[in-house]
Image: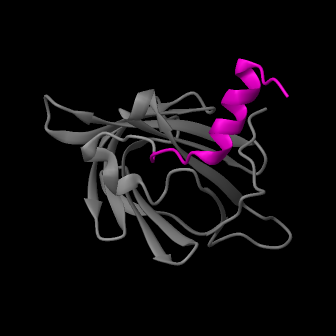
Amino acid sequence: MILSSTSFALILGMTVTSAPETLDPQLEPFRPFIGKTWKGTFANSTPEKPVIDIVRYERAMNGKAVRALHSINNGEYGGETLIYWDSEKKSLSFFYLTTAGFRTEGVITTEKDGFSSVEDVKGNANGITKVRGLAKITGPGKMKVTSEYFKDNAWVPGRETSYVEDSTAQVIFK
């Protein structure tokens, strides 16, 4: 039997294991999130009015960034985050663009089993100017995200969402 170069490459690819995808060393704390899709239920969600968030973390920009895509209630709201190492600031920084027309820029601090963030909000019609957030892996296949909003010169409770890994969940944009 004669194999074409394509067939040979396919067979070779099946027998050789590849090394893990590279990631900028400063982004390594995000590796437990990358390649996973999470389905979260907001704490104030009810069976009559569910609020479900789907978020997926991916390696991006040849390992120089981490992308997080999310959508709430099948695209009613969503956004995309790019996390990267800012060599000028010597910190993990990010941009977040939303389907609601506003954006944020912030700084991330890695923590045991997760990360915290502080971000400045640009263009939010609800008067929110800053957000503080915390994302933690709380057990195998479980994550919790909490946030606070700075509005009217005071920090107010934001959202609390409990997530489970769900490989069948999909981020949807309309």
In which image quadrant can residue 169 be found?
bottom right
The residue at the point 52 percent across, 70 percent down is 143
Does 133 appear above or below 43?
Answer: above
Residue at the bottom extreme?
139
The residue at the point 67 percent across, 56 percent down is 53
The boundaries of the magenta stretch are 1-20
Does 30 appear above or below 80?
Answer: below
Does 74 appear above or below 67?
Answer: below
Front position in the image: 111 or 61? 61
Q: Is residue 44 left or right of residue 126?
A: right
Question: Residue 109 location in percent, x, y?
Answer: 25, 54
Whether residue 44 is in magenta: the answer is no
Q: Which quadrant, please, contains the N terminus?
A: top right
Question: Residue 172 location in percent, x, y?
Answer: 75, 40
The residue at the point 70 percent across, 63 percent down is 166
Front position in the image: 99 or 164? 164
